[in-house]
Amino acid sequence: MPTAEFETMSKTQKLAAFFIIVGPDLAPELMKQLRDPEIEAVAREMAVMDVVDFKLQEKILEEFCGLIGDGLSTALGGMAFAQRALEAARGPQAASSILLRALPASNSIDAVRELSQMDTRQIFNIIKNEQPQTVAFILSYLDGRQVSQIIPLFSPEAREEIVERLGTMDSISSELINKVLRSLGKHLSTGPQQYSMHKRGGAQAAAQLLKSLDKELSKNLLGRIEERNAELGKAIRKRLFNFEDISTLTQRDVQRLLRDVETQELAVAMKNASEAVKRVFFGAMSKRASESLKEEIEIQGPVRNKDIEAAQDRIIAQIMQLSEAGEIDISQEDSSESAG
């Protein structure tokens, strides 16, 4: 069938061509998802269809992605189905490229949501050849479970670049963000447009990403980032666990921490602490020790903010050291699953 006829083909004819392209192994299985009248209509078109030339195949495969978003998603299984079928027709690499170009979305959030419905290996296949900045942006919109499975699939060098780009994303201009998003949604059905996604990067987003990873991988990645960008590494480390997060520790872990912290330094660190943090510390002490600490806090008078922060930083550093040694557990099971 000549490429020129593509514009005049009906959806049924295009679907028939698609089944021819994916071949006899997959087409029957896909047809099971259609109703009998639809199967008959498609079969009639297949019976009279000439050989589908290569250029027409490309158009059909891209159109197929559009059809998924235009009424066939319920019958055919959405984007995961599209990825599988395209892989059967063209292989994983070409399938990812076609799907990325034809991803049906009315805006960039829709595009990322479409990706989020796919399994992690499929997402990786689509984004693995994108720029680290693009990958970082996409990952910031996926949940922690997906991110924890996708990041290890990248090379160690790529992981470092992705996390660093995510950590510095706060400084990216809206114009550049739109370029990144257009790279994700090339040739969307809605055509070129300005997108309105808000920025989800920065040290906090990078810290959330690291929290979702295996502890050893997270530690190694942070160490490498600190070597590449000391300021960013410090900012991320501070957000991995801050002073207020102490309220999530168990009493046993706080008691272990208290063995390594001087009462005077703790009093300075707790000068502007929340009631939740104070309760955790006081609850982990004997009545006599807690009364002594309360008295120390009261009699020390005004304390400069930078001195309070310095004391808190030293205590956090001690917590991280104990965590890395396996003596306390700082994981926060109830924290958000989102990496962003």
Image: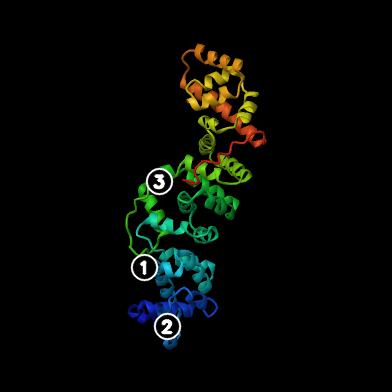
Spatial CA span between label 3 and label 1: 29 Å
Amino acid under label 3? Lys
Residue at far top of view: 299
Q: Earlier in the sequence, mark 3 or mark 2?
A: 2
Task: Choose top left, top right, bottom left or bottom right for residue 40.
Answer: bottom left
| Nearest the eye: 43 or 175 | 43
Would you identify the image quadrant in which residue 1 lies? bottom left
Q: Residue at x 55, y 78 (%)?
A: 25
- Where residue 70 is drawn, which disc sits there? 1
Relative horizontal placement of residue 323, taking residue 80 as reference (left or right): right
The residue shown at (39%, 54%) is 109
Residue hosting label 3: 199
Question: At numbered mark 3, what does the secondary structure look like: helix, strand or loop?
Answer: loop
Q: What residue is shown at x 60% (from left), y 15% (from top)?
A: 288
Give the amino acid at mark 2: Glu
Q: Which mark is residue 40?
A: 2
Residue 178 x, y percent position in the rendering: 37, 53
Q: Residue furthest bottom?
A: 48
Pinpoint residue 122: horizontal percent, then vertical percent.
Answer: 52, 61
SS of the residue at dot 1?
helix
